[in-house]
Image (cartoon, rainbow, N blue to C red):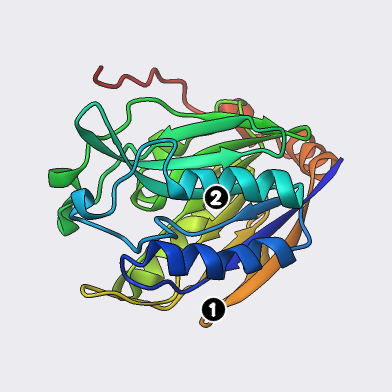
Amino acid sequence: MKLNVAICQVDMEWEEIGHNLARIEKVVAEAAADVVVLPEMFATGFKLRPSVVAESMDGAVVTAMRRWAEEYNKAVVGSVVIEEDGKYRNRMLFVEPSGKMTQYDKHHLFRPGGEARDYTPGNRRVVVEYKGFRFLMLVCYDLRFPVWSRNRGDYDAIIYCASWDNKRRDAWRTLLRARAIENQCYVIGVNRVGTDPDAVYIGDSMAVDYIGRTLADAESGEWTMVVTLDLEEQRAFRQSFPAWMDADDFELKTAE
């Protein structure tokens, strides 16, 4: 069983939702893949004043993602600033052509940049199954926390949507590979390029396989790269090298 995933490393205009949606729609439409992955907060830029750009689940960004998925017959993945019950969430969405939508609220908020002050964290891991593949949905800073990412036999690949600052690019590249190797899974890490008032983003979007081999590496600039995930090859490797059988058992607890 195989699945094609498009890694869409794009730039975006600060707070210009309409402009960004129009521009990124072309990227989604042209990506020859079953799943299209966009960076964190792709329609707004990484935003630490959420009241300026936050929307509801029937707002412009979510509506656009639903339309793209249906019209172009591919799943669309990215994160959106959502206001709900008076709280702000950095919400990752996996939107399928059927209209089904799976959501994950970023659990580890980027305290050094103030995100933990302005947003409310999610408290549950989310795995979505699509066309036979199980994807763990994670956002940016989540990458630094291996326990939250640990494979308990419940997923085949991790998707990280990110706005990862160029100053920490070595950590990004190293940790993507580490998460793939330790969990014997595919890892898709999609970062943005360009600038905002606080940071410079070089990109470095990557796809890494279950052994740690690089399948795609965007480095800098705007790119759409398509990688093929092969479930049978992954399962064969996990059977021949069953490190997962020796993993330490643990119970993950989160605050309600």
Provide the secondary structure element on which disc 1 rests: loop
- Measuring 63% from the left and 46% from the top, which residue is drawn there? 67
Pick the residue in front: 249 or 99. 99
Is residue 191 in sight in this rendering?
A: no
Q: Is 217 drawn above or below residue 64 in the view shown?
A: below
Disc on res. 133: none
* Circle 1: residue type: Glu
Name the residue that disc number 2 marks. Answer: 64
Q: Which quadrant would the C terminus be assigned to in this image?
A: top left
Question: Residue 176 at x, y = what percent?
Answer: 50, 57
Residue 190: image x %, image y %?
Answer: 52, 61
Packing grade of label 1 (10 A; few <14, some 14-19, many >=20) is some
Residue at image x 44%, y 34%?
104
Residue 213's quadrant in the figure?
A: bottom right
Q: Which residue is drawn at 31% across and 60% down?
A: 46
Q: Nearer the viewer, mark 2 or mark 1?
A: 2
Between discs 2 and 1, the one toward the N terminus? 2
What residue lies at 39% left-to-right and 17% top-to-bottom?
251
Q: What residue type is labelled 2?
A: Ala
Seen in the picture, residue 71 relative to 29 is either above or below; the reply is: above
Crowd rating for badge 2 (residues with CA inside 10 Å; few <14, some 14–19, many 20+): some
Res. 171 visible in picture: yes
- Provide residue 249's location: percent of width, then percent of height: 46, 21
Q: Which of 155 and 118 is in front in this view?
A: 118
**Direction from residue 140 to residue 47 in the image, left or right:** left
In the displayed image of the protein, which residue is found farthest to the bottom?
Answer: 221
Q: Which mark is residue 219?
A: 1
Q: Depth check: give the residue in front, 206 or 84.
A: 84
Q: Distance between the residues labelled 2 and 1?
A: 28 Å
